[in-house]
Image: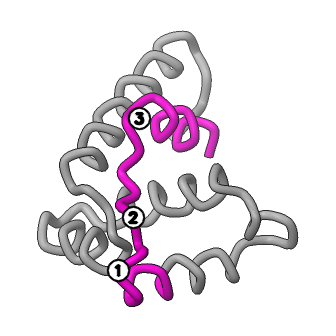
Amino acid sequence: AAADAAAMLSVRSPLKSTQRDAQAENWRVSLRNTLRPGGGKSDHCLAVAIMQLWERDRSARGRRELCQQAGLAYERMAEASTVRGQLVAGLRGLGFAVG
């Protein structure tokens, strides 16, 4: 989760404004409600949960659907995923067991 948070904080936010997108706002609220008590109020916890969903589905179609549903910028999510991979590789190179 630490690599997910660091990656999401290392790039420009992939979260688009949901002022005019009720579907994306509802999706985010639903995801926030699944987070542990207290985590639903944290944008960082939301970002980690989104990155974990992104990493879980490796297909371009699934990732595009995630971006559509959640109101995310696909290119920024791809950039965050690349940064995450670099962070994980660096940590593994230092002997840490991260995934």
Q: Nearer the viewer, residue 95 or 57?
A: 57
Can you identify the residue that label 1 sits on? 20
Residue 13 point in image, percent of width and height: 41, 45
Q: Residue at x 63, y 38 (%)?
A: 2
Q: Secondary structure at mark 1?
A: loop
Q: Which residues are magenta?
A: 1-27
Q: Quadrant of residue 57?
A: bottom left
Q: Quadrant of residue 80?
A: top left
Determine whether, in the image, residue 65 is placed left or right of residue 10: left
- Residue type of the residue flagged with mark 3: Arg
CA gap, disc 1 and disc 3: 30 Å
The disc, 1 or 3, on the residue closer to the chain's N-terminal end is: 1
Q: Indicate whether residue 54 is drawn in magenta.
A: no
- Residue type of the residue flagged with mark 1: Arg
Residue 98 point in image, percent of width and height: 56, 35
CA gap, disc 2 and disc 1: 8 Å
Q: Secondary structure at mark 3?
A: helix
Q: Which mark is residue 84?
A: 3
Can you identify the residue that label 2 sits on? 17
Disc nearest the viewer among 2 and 3: 2
Determine whether, in the image, residue 3 is placed left or right of residue 7: right
Q: Residue furthest front?
A: 19
Q: Nearer the viewer, residue 64 or 89?
A: 64
97 over 68 or under it: above or below = above
46 over 84 or under it: above or below = below
Q: Nearer the viewer, residue 78 or 12?
A: 12
Q: Nearer the viewer, residue 61 or 77?
A: 77
Tell whether label 1 touches label 2 (CB within 8 Å).
yes
- Residue type of the residue flagged with mark 2: Ser
The image shows a total of numbered marks equal to 3
Q: Quadrant of residue 74?
A: bottom left
